Amino acid sequence: MKTLIINLVLRISVLFVIFYLLLGTILTGCAPVTQPAATGQQSTGVTATQGTTFPVAAGIPRFKIATTTSLYDTGLWNYLEPMFEKKANVRLDIVYAGTGVALEYGKRGDVDAVVVHDPEAEAKFIADGYGINKRSFAFNHFLIAGPAGDPAGIKGLSPEQAFKKIYEGGIADPARVKFVSRGDNSGTHSKEKLIWQAAGFKYEDIQKSGSWYMEAGKGMGPCLLMASEQGTYVLADISTFLAFRGKVNVVALVEQGALFLNIYDAMAINPEKVKTAKMLPTANAFINWLMSDQVQDIIATYGAAGYGRPLFNPLKGGGCTEPGCPKLEDYTVPVK
Amino acid sequence: MQELWEALVQAISLIVSLDAEVIEISLRSLYVSAAAILIAAVLCVPIGGIIHFHDFKGKRVLINVIQTFYSIPTVVVGLFVFLFISRAGPLGGLELLFTPAAIVIGQVILILPVLTGMTISALNGVDRAVKDTALSLGASGSQAIWTIIGEARFAVVGTLILGFGRAISEVGAAMMLGGNIRSYTRVLTTAISLETQRGDLVLSLALGIILIGIAMVISVIVNILLQRY
């Protein structure tokens, strides 16, 4: 009896398998085969630049990188991806995350290169032996945005002074002056901590100082939307801010300050430290390609058509002259 | 609320214009979750059957445990599987992280408890009298079990649709394990999450409408098949 039951149950499960296989065949069989959109124009924000690629073409190695969200959300990678795939004959798999998570993926060997923007975390990543061949390839700036009414009166101040004013305003009247923080260990979050420090605060004290300080734990876009909904101040990178202009009800209030410099760096994962990283030559080629005239020229103009001005600045030609800019060899000497 | 209307219009226009990327993403969603439900069904329906047709010590406890895992959060499943298949993890050598297979694994684990538990419930739902009647009419033991399963088929298929729904609509595991890589692991839910992050709320909503449309088509097809056979 017992074996009979098991036997039956097995037969039933086979029936289910057949049923689902049939269902699968019917569904995929009936579904329209992918055709390029007839109009040929990008009809979605997801950018329809290439057709379907599954089942995956065999034989082409997959090169995985983790990139910071600000670069990803602007669509820059969508634009660059097919170019590098063609050049290096790889499939470029791009995973996006805040700098902290991106570096974690690198440490675990889940990606072969990282593109991030947090100088301190990067220095530690390199010192710990995980990252090698760091090169800079683009920069732009952070800014402080907030409600047009500017309840804390920060317009035109330096970043440090502005943060101080926001703190004072928040303590005095948390209903009127608020600040929303990324709170996610991203490069932007690190920059925010740095500015608090420069303004003479301990970050832990800020976190605990009251309801005016809100930690979102979200990406830049959601934080801008939150700032817009709640009428709060927010530290943002200019590219995401421009991408959200018109969608959010906050304006740029503080745009000048040495601390606002935002440099994007690419690093390969060190195969000697992370045994599973096997694509160092590709990673090197990738880093060198980012410094090439081809990519630098794209960066110089990317976004100008859609946002009225380029979202990033190339480093080529010594465009970055502020204190804190990378040294010439950090963005010109190819890695080996 | 203007957005809702715009989203509906955009969803329809995306479907009508056969937008290449949207179709690709939708098909991937379908194919990943179909694979997940297939594997889960192969595992769960027999497991559920065995648990139902057997009496053993701790059966109630086991069922309670299974039912507890109905509410396992998708990100927890994602994190759990991530730790296993990340290259630094015990199964890292398989290089599964950030592949569609990783999403399938996550979704299978996510829906295993639901499918097993609901299969048991479905079989429980069949009136005991059915079995007794079958036996009294001279059916053999196996014929009686067949009868019970035949009676429970609507509920079992309903369970599978539920599992499929949980799989195709989850975003936590798909994001964490697939990485939302364009034209490789991007599925509808992760695309929605990305477009929301980018601030394109209308496109996000439109993709959501497409997802619901797919779910509707599937449930209609399954029900037609069920009525017929």
Image (cartoon, coloured by chain):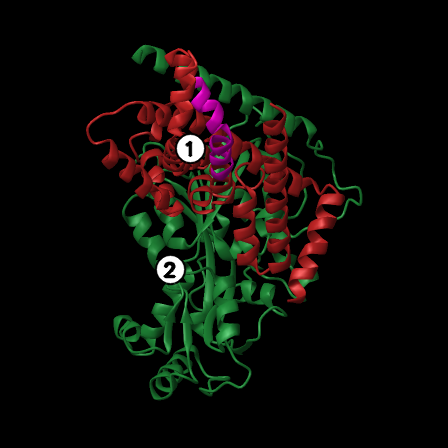
Q: Which chain is green?
A: A
Q: Which mark is residue B149?
A: none
Residue at point 40%, 26% (across, down):
B129
Q: Which chain is red?
A: B
Q: How many marks?
A: 2
In the picture shown, does residue A206 fall above or below B119? below
Residue A42 can be seen, yes or no = no
Q: Quadrant of the C terminus of chain A?
A: top left
Which chain is mark 2 on? A
Residue A35 can be seen, yes or no = yes
What main secondary structure does the magenta stretch of the protein show? Answer: helix
Per the image, the residue denoted by label 2 is A184
Within the image, what quadrant is residue A211 found in?
Answer: bottom left
* Residue type at the position of mark 2: Asp
**Residue A28 position within the rendered picture, expressed as x and y whole percent measured from the top left:** 64, 28
Which residue lies most toward the left here? B57
In the picture shown, does residue A322 fall above or below B44? below
The one nearer the camera, B217 or B136, is B136
The one nearer the camera, A319 or A51, is A51
Per the image, the residue denoted by label 1 is B122
The one nearer the camera, A1 or B18, is A1
| Magenta-drawn segment | B146-162
SS state under label 2: loop
Circles 2, 1 touching at the beta carbon (< 8 Å): no
* Residue type at the position of mark 1: Ala
Please tell me whether residue B160 belongs to the stretch shown in magenta: yes
Which chain is mark 1 on? B
In the picture shown, does residue A178 fall above or below A172? above
